[in-house]
Image (cartoon, grey):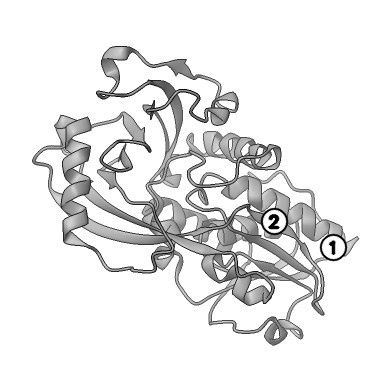
Amino acid sequence: MSTQTHSAQPTRITVIGAGVIGLSSAYELASAGHHVTVIADQDSLETVSAVAAAIWFPYHSENSPAADLLLARSLARFEKLAHIAETGVDLRTGLNVDHVPGADRSWTKIVANVSEALPADLPEGAFGGAYATVPIITMSTYLLWLKNEVAKLGVTFIRQTIKDLKELEHDADVVVIAGGLRGGELLGDDDTVYPIRGQVLRLANTNNLRNWLCDDDYPEGVSYIIPRREDIIVGGTDTAHDWNQEVDPKTATQILRRATALVPELAGLQVLEHKVGLRPARASIRLELVSGHRLPVVAAYGHGGAGVTLSWGTAQRVAELVDSALS
């Protein structure tokens, strides 16, 4: 599956973080022949990645040519993975709603099959919308599959909290920081990372819904309905600088009410779970070699609500930056 070439001399690389960015980076690096260790204070299924809906869509993330390359690379990889049933990746068609003229549709130039929405399919007050077929990832399945694939490549996993990069000086040749909200803290030079709180519900998909709907500017609050194989993720919230990780019952009621107004078929479906995740946001993604440390360090954090969406492109870029650091 990897596009990387094998390095002549294996290098000891420590990846900090076991979310989707950390695991994807570990996969690319191990595929390139490096000796990789993933250190994290949370299991992959405890990270914010596990809370993700997850739909390929650049939500609350950087809009730039560099980010477009990450998006395109990730989309290509997920489209390939959709042909492997055990990955939990499926291609599903849905509708992204626009409420204002000139809404950002830069993502549509990366997707091959975008078409204009029919007026009859739009919520009241919507200006327009776009149909698209994109990857939907069942994260509980996907993260387990990806972690297993990484382990097959010989990657070692350590459960530990790293407080200072100096702790790794004797055990690594290169360090990759994929630590989400802790990325800036670990590097000690970036206090611009902040959380965007997301709360969602997981419903039983007993009606076998397949089409997704995203309405970021819905007047009553951001709304998305993402049907997966056996459940439906319904959201949500996008509250910046909110560190609260407890489920708010009143918010859950509001989320479900507005989602059901958009998709009436949700009415009466069993609520399986409530979840909260803190998206690691930043004005721009930090994906670069960082100077000033005894070891070469690659930063890979600040993806906002698009960590899954940007994961494979980020991982490929991490591998390129590691090659650059070692050359």
> Is 21 placed above or below 175 here?
above
The secondary element bearing badge 2 is classed as strand
State the residue at coordinates (68%, 74%).
Answer: 187
Q: Which residue is mark 1?
A: 325
Residue type at tag 2: Leu
Evaluate whether residue 208 shows in this view.
no
> Is 16 placed above or below 313 here?
below
State the residue at coordinates (22%, 47%).
Answer: 255
Q: Which mark is residue 287?
A: 2
> Is 324 placed above or below 168 here?
above
Query: Image quarter for residue 55?
Result: top left
Label 1 crowd (10 A; few <14 / some 14-19 / many >=20) = some
State the residue at coordinates (72%, 50%).
Answer: 317
Q: Where's residue 103, x and y in %?
A: 48, 28
Pick the residue in front: 89 or 203: 203
Q: Where's residue 131, x and y in %?
A: 41, 21
Residue type at tag 1: Ala
Evaluate whether residue 171 shows in this view.
yes
State the residue at coordinates (51%, 53%).
Answer: 304
